[in-house]
Amino acid sequence: MEREVVELENQAGVEEPDPITSRSMSGPLLIASLALIGTLIWALYDEVYGRRPWKAMQREFVERYTAYLKRIKPRQAATEAALKQSPEYKKLEQDLMAARQAVAPRVREIDRELAEIERQLEAIRPVFQDARAKIGALTYEWEVATSERAKARKMRQIEEAKRGPFRVRLIAANGEGTNQEWRLTFDELQRRFLGLQERKAQLVSERARLLEPVAEIEKKMNQYLQDHLVGLDQKQIDGLLRKMETFKIELKQIHVADGDLVDRCISCHVGILEPLPLTEQIMGRKAFVSHPNPRLLRIHNPERFGCSPCHGGNGRATTSVVKAHGLNKHWLWPLYQPENYEAGCVQCHFRDRVLEGAEVFNLGRDLYELKGCVGCHRYEGYDRETDALAEVRKTIRQLNVERAENEREIRRTLRAADQATDDREARRLYALAESLRVKNSQIADRLEQLELQAKYLMQDQKKVGPNLKEIRMKLRKEWIPVWIENPHAFRPTTKMPRFRLTKEEVQAISAYLWQTALRDPVPAQPPGDPIRGRELFETRGCLACHAIGEGAQAIGGTFAANLSRVGEKVNYDYLVRWIHNPRERARPYCPNERRDIGPEDYAKKGLPFRFDLNHSKCPSCGSEMQVQQMTVMPSLRLSWQEARDIASFLMTQRRSGVSYPPAPFMDDPKLKARGAQLIRRYGCAGCHEISGFEEEPKIGTELTREGSKPLEQLDFGLLAREAKRQGWYNHKGFIEHKLRQPDIYDRGKLKAPEDRLRMPNPNLTEEEIRALTTFLLGSVNATLPPSYYYTPADQRKDIQEGWWIIKKYNCMGCHTILPGQRSVLSTLPRYQDPDWKDQLPPSLIGEGARVRPDWLARFLENPALSETNLERNGVREYLKVRMPTFFFSPNEIRILVRFFEALSAQAQPYIEPKLEPITETERALARQLFTSPAAPCLRCHMTGDPAHDQRATAPNFLIARERLKPGWTARWMIDPQAISPGTAMPSGLFRREGDRWVFAGPLPEAFRTYPGDHVDLLVRYMFQLTAEEQRRLLAATRLTARARPPSVSMASDRSRGRKGGT
Amino acid sequence: MKTWRRSALAVILVLAALSLQCGKKEEVSEAPKEEAAPTTTYQPTGDEGAIAGVVNFTGQPPQRRRIQMDADPVCAQKNPNALSEEVIVNNGKLQNVFVYVKSGLEKYSFAVPAEEVVLDQNGCMYRPHVLGVMANQNVKIITSDPTNHNIHPTPKNNPEWNVNQPPGSDPIIRSFPRPEVMIPVKCNQHPWMRAYIGVLRHPFHAVSKEDGSFEIKGLPPGEYEIEAWHERYGAQVAKVTVGPKETKQIEFTYAAGQAYRPGSLRLMPALVLPCCEKGMGHASLSKR
């Protein structure tokens, strides 16, 4: 009890603490205010620096760049000084002095006179201007005066004012002599003023004329420095230093109003447009480099193109590198990685098949076609012929409707005219009917053209893979299932991708193909000579497209099939026929009747079983048929013996002792239906012709806009999380992984076989994956205004279209078309030998300037340039490699001719320039020159003499007239190395003498008095050369050759020795 | 109490972290390096040694063929008995082998000799047949023939050119800017004409003479790889160490069998003739 009381007392005794006075809030308040201040500082910092990282960047750039400029300045100064000491420059300096001295007296005189005139003008000008103003004002008053009296008064005032006198005080020159004063009337004043001005103009122009040579030399001196100084000169460096001194730290941007583009990339990448090549090594930071490809920037001026259209990224963002580069979440267009830079080309260059300098882009474009992507996935531009054919057929239908409509209208109008009440109306209606009739005839013209187009376009359609209707004639039966199961096991570099097929599926597909294949016979062939066949295979040009050997051993092109082990699979007789003419088909296909037409169909109509490009109408329904194999492989116009030799060589391309298990299931009719189902499912007909699948649609998604598909629509399957973790959850990652392993996104999923991903494995190298990824990444929806697109309407369009044909037939396998490009043939070991170099097909750079378009069209149609002698080259008969017959349609020939003409900027259509006819004297002169021992022409050029032509290395002059353009011929003769570096024709055959070209060797006597240009003379002689004249020439040469019979030289001995050799 | 303390702590930590951030300087690679200073030109010390030797040839050398010069009667007249120079063997010694220092001189640079190396076209043959120059050293090409020639080197690493030289014209003086072993030179008008120019970044080379001997003088002491190159028989390498004022003897030996043909295609490991194998022969296939 007592205890309780004490406790109570205690409680009462302890005062209740005042919550306000007893607890101090100063601690929390201090911290809070500190935090507040801290936040403020942070906010300020963030505002000024944190969110403006480019400020520090710019400061650093100025510092580093200034240091670099200062470092190189003395070095450049030294080189410049050294240059000024060079004899050339000294000579120019002397010239300058001499030129200056030559005109100095007169210039001094002029300057003196000019000074005097200027002195007088200075005195007169203010007086004259005052007077003129005053009189002008009075004249105006006279003009606006209303009464006669007022006018008369004003006139008097004007006259009075003109009388003056005006006082001009002429200050004495140089303070010597006396000051003069003139008193003049206005007219005198004006005369004197204008006279002085006229004289001054005269003197000034004379002075400029006198000093012209001086200025000319000064220009030369500057030019000399510019030409010989690598890098910038002192003035330029000083300019850049000044620029750095006055550099303003600010947000820098490129604004392109067209398209409302704002790119602030240059806020950090300050050096990107600098004229000096700045590397990371020089600047110490990758961000400060100058653009590594200034040529590209000259074409795509950043002022107009900005940065992000090509590079991707977020051009407006400036707060962090991640954001500016568009690498943050939800930003759709991240900066392209260096390996995919050329993805940026695709959007605007969607019409281009080949872009000069864009190797990755070009490879991606190539692979899309070569690897057969195009068989399943539509991509705008690739199915040119199919798309154009559909378009043409549509137009034909429309025009037919229009024509029928017109016919009806004509009938109606005529009836109405017959019954018209008055003649005038009748005449009007008859005229209307007539004009409609004419209109219909115009429609008929168009229809004729369109039907031709349709015919050509149909033949121009090609497929990536071979025709499987002929496998019974072509292939070893047991090989087929082995191949289908895993093509890469048989041939690692094949275009045929690997499908993930079960044994049952392989059997069903093989069975369908085998049972539906044609059973036509192939004529039996006697065996050929494989040794000779190998020589032909190596030298006729097969290796421009085909390779032999796998991996590091592979030699040849990758355009067509690698032919290693071809002997294990193919039937010799079929191979011979194929090599002889790969376009030969067993049966034509009629798209209208949807079947292959056989001899029986022709027999029904009493027609012989004959079909080719000129006999392409279906005997049953009259529509256009597919009469060629849908392959791009051309005919090399080989003899049957040569075809047999090459085939015999190819039959040796196999491993010995291989055996394939028998495949009886291929004849099992029960498997056929299942096979058809699978062929449809896997889209085999995208690349192959297969019976019953001629009109199959493509099975894959269109990829024209694949790069801008929303990321969420790309099915990463169960790998999305892994992809995010590993940093490839983006378009690039998706495409790369898919190409590497097409079924990767099925991983871990339980799916019915028919739901699994169908894309087969194309077995690509990493380089190929990179190129295809780049191409697809760039295949985006249009985000830029159309004015950005490269869609020229002039000759450049012809170039764009031509590339599709050039690539379609692999012209670059044999020819150089772009400067710097090397053909496949020229990289082969054989052609590294100096003798074999002369055996390379000609470079086609400048082909449009070289040959006449009409000739080129003829040549492309028939490269033998002969109807009877087909087994030769029409121009360069001495070449072992052969220009093949591609069976180009007139459509393609037109595109190709226009392409070459456009590449050389030739005006179209070609109009032959008139050449001055050659006189008898001139002919005698030219003949002498041609046959003189010093002139080498006939040593290398073909003459028609078989023994000579065997070792010739240049075409016959006889075809010059129909083939060449004279202007080009002259330029070629003067400097062939400039047109085609490395050509057998030497430069320096002519030298410049005054304003004409003169043969550089010893000249025949008669030339002493010939005043004309020798090149011009020879061109005219060549263009007017007749066969008879050539015979005369040859006879004359033989005379000088002391009638010794020509024999084979040692060089051809040597090359022959080599043929059999390895 | 605890809550505000914790938040205060957080704020302080953040501030501290921020201040640290402010203090941290961006790390950038320091002052860019200058381009590597060019090695100084070698100054002879008097200690130089030499390499001398001979190129042997074993086996039966191929017969030297007579060159038919009918294509140009001027040549045939001037040089009626010209023999092929591809392989010249005298008493078991091989001529026209280009011997040079392949490696070991990287640390030196050498002044380009001012004198020109002469290549003469005489009797529609090149004199000499094999020659060596330094990069940027002038080659003076002269013609002693009353017929037209063109000079057409076909290099791999140097620019290619092809220039006409009529009889009696001035010498053509040119140089090759980059080292390259060897540059074939030909005349398109006389296809048998062939010379080989070895372009080096130093002056240490020799061509084996008629007796197969060669000598490279003035070599700084050191370890070297010496290569011998022959147009038909290819290259051989020898390693030598040359001491001060020492003349090292080396020998190369070529054998008749080992022809080397750069222009050939090495396609097939073995040629299996289609007619000779059973089972898969084309005859049996075509009957199917």
Image (tube, rainbow, N blue to C red):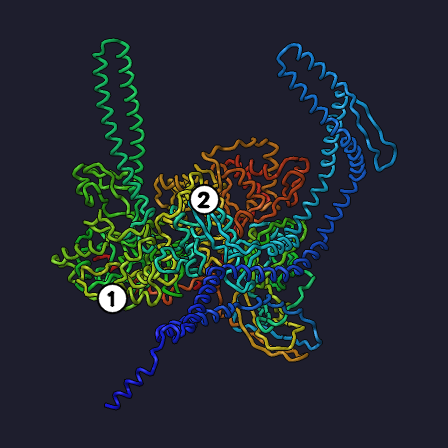
Q: Residues within 10 Å of mark 1 (few under 14, many from 20)?
A: few
Q: Position of residue B2 (x, y in %)?
A: 35, 76
Q: Give the residue drawn at x 15%, y 61%.
A: A665
Q: Give the residue drawn at x 77%, y 45%.
A: A97
Q: Residues within 10 Å of mark 2 (few under 14, many from 20)?
A: few
Q: Position of residue A616 (x, y in %)?
A: 26, 39
**Quick check: A109 left or right of A354?**
right
Q: Quadrant of residue A1006?
A: top right
**What residue is pinned by disc 2?**
A257
Quadrant in which the N terminus of chain A is drawn: bottom left
**What residue is pinned by disc 1?**
A747
Residue that extends furthest to the left in the rendered view of this protein: A670
Q: Amino acid at mark 1?
A: Arg
Q: Position of residue B54 (x, y in %)?
A: 60, 74
* Mark positioned earlier in the residue sequence (2 or 1): 2
Callout 1: residue from which chain? Answer: A
